[in-house]
Image: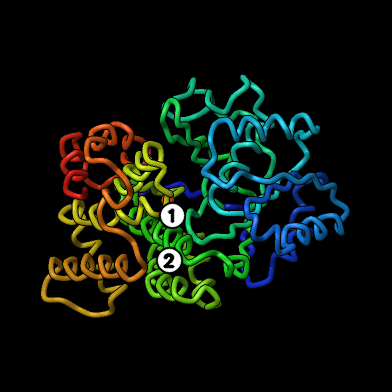
């Protein structure tokens, strides 16, 4: 049975090696003045960002540039960028072009929304769970997103994850209106991403594909996207980590990450992402690394309520049959452990610098939109036991 569903996705997806040069023609359909946000110092040094600005100007667009800080975006970062853009005259009719990893795209999405939604003076008031419950009522500046890492899938989602360390939280600014209008994925931009970042961001994409495939909000189109994304990422991720110049692997990972974004935006996630938010805010563990460490445990804790689905994924990824669904799931869990070891993912929370006495405070911070999608409802006691077992 298919049932009812609603599906959101970017209006236009442009994918391909070297296609960044089409940015001018694409952006000119969104506005005459461009607020260009770049998050990669490497791409800036190599001249890619200047070339991008040139492509935009060559199409007659007025370009204003800004650099995103090299961290997951904080409330103060969004407020500062919004104020900067407003002070320089940003207004409805303009557009935003963002090039960078998930943090940069999230910062751009949030500022693009805040420029046109002028109630109050901080994005904090609009954040899920911690704000004043305000919503994005005015259309954000339309966004053209150019991801440079294959991970978060932020280029295809309707939220921006915003952190605060005092008080500590990691929450989303979310609105159906925040889905980027155009996604321009040029996998060639990812060839200079370092090995460790490739591993962490790739594991984020893989975790998103697995959690979206199993979530209690699973829906038909995301399920189909997850299947293709999982098949591609499973073999491409170790190859992209070993050899960053492997074009086929980089293309497969860029596409899988994009699919993971569309899947999670429509299906939600699970406990790995729930705890990852807590690890990010309390211990500044990079998002992809936190997801990677949590993934094996997340699969194990959900295996008995998603046995058929996990067995099917085992067949899809490992290409063989087993005597029972339970045996297939065992094989999948072993293979995920082996993949994590292969690409250098630590297996214990203590390896991430989390002191054991901090585990109890991770429990309340793990609650949120991601955890609510987990197939099994987890009590705080179960969550605490899970964290203890991983320490
Ligand atoms: Fe993620």
Quarter of the figure with residue 370: top left
- Residue 177, given in percent of the width and then of the height, sits at 59, 39
Other-residue count near label 1 (Cα within 10 Å), few / some / many at <14 / 14–19 / ≥20: many
Residue highlighted by disc 1: 263
- Residue named by callout 2: 229
Task: State the separation of the CA atoms marked 2 and 1.
Answer: 10 Å
Most foreground residue, 366 or 22 = 366
Q: Residue at x 32, y 35 (%)?
A: 367
Which residue lies at the image location 80% right of the left edge and 32% below the top edge?
Answer: 89
Disc 2 is placed on an element classified as helix
Can residue 49 be seen from the camera position used here? Answer: yes
Q: Residues within 10 Å of mark 2 (few under 14, many from 20)?
A: many
Q: Is residue 30 above or below residue 17?
A: above
Q: Coloured how?
A: rainbow
Q: Position of residue 88 (x, y in %)?
A: 80, 33
Residue 26 in percent (x, y) is at 74, 57
Image position of 380 (left or right of 251): left
Please state, as top left, top right, bottom left or bottom right, where the N terminus lies in the image: bottom left
Please indicate, yes or no, whether residue 1 appears anywhere in the rendered image: no
């Amino acid at each position: 049975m298919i049932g009812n569903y609603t599906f959101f996705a970017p209006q236009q997806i442009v994918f391909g090696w070297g296609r960044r040069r089409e940015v001018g023609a694409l952006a000119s359909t969104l506005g005459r003045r461009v607020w260009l946000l770049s998050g990669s110092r490497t791409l800036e040094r190599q001249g890619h960002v200047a070339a991008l600005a040139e492509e935009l100007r060559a199409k007659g667009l007025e370009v204003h540039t800004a650099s995103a800080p090299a961290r997951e975006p904080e409330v103060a970062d969004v407020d500062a960028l919004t104020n900067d853009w407003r002070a320089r005259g940003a207004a409805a009719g303009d557009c935003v072009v963002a090039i960078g990893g998930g943090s940069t795209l999230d910062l751009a999405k949030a500022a693009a929304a805040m420029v046109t939604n002028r109630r109050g003076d901080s994005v904090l008031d609009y954040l899920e769970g911690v704000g004043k419950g305000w919503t994005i009522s005015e259309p954000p500046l339309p966004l053209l997103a150019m991801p440079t890492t294959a991970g978060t899938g932020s280029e295809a989602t309707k939220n921006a994850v915003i952190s605060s360390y005092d008080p500590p939280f990691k929450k989303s600014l979310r609105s159906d209106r925040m889905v980027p209008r155009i996604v321009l994925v040029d996998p060639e931009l990812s060839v200079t991403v370092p090995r460790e970042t490739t591993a962490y961001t790739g594991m984020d994409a893989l975790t998103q594909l697995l959690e979206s495939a199993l979530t209690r909000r699973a829906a038909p189109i995301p399920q189909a996207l997850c299947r293709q994304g999982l098949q591609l990422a499973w073999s491409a991720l170790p190859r992209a980590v070993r050899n960053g110049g492997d074009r086929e692997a980089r293309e497969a990972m860029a596409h899988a990450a994009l699919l993971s974004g569309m899947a999670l935006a429509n299906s939600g996630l699970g406990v790995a992402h729930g705890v990852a938010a807590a690890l990010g805010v309390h211990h500044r563990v990079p998002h992809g690394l936190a997801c990677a460490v949590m993934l094996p445990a997340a699969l194990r804790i959900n295996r008995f309520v998603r046995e058929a689905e996990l067995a099917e994924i085992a067949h899809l990824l490992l290409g063989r049959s087993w005597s029972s669904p339970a045996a297939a799931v065992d094989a999948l869990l072993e293979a995920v452990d082996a993949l994590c070891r292969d690409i250098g993912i630590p297996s214990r929370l203590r390896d991430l610098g989390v002191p054991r006495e901090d585990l109890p405070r991770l429990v309340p911070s793990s609650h949120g939109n991601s955890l609510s999608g987990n197939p099994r409802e987890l009590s705080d006691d179960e969550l605490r036991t899970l964290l203890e077992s991983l320490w």
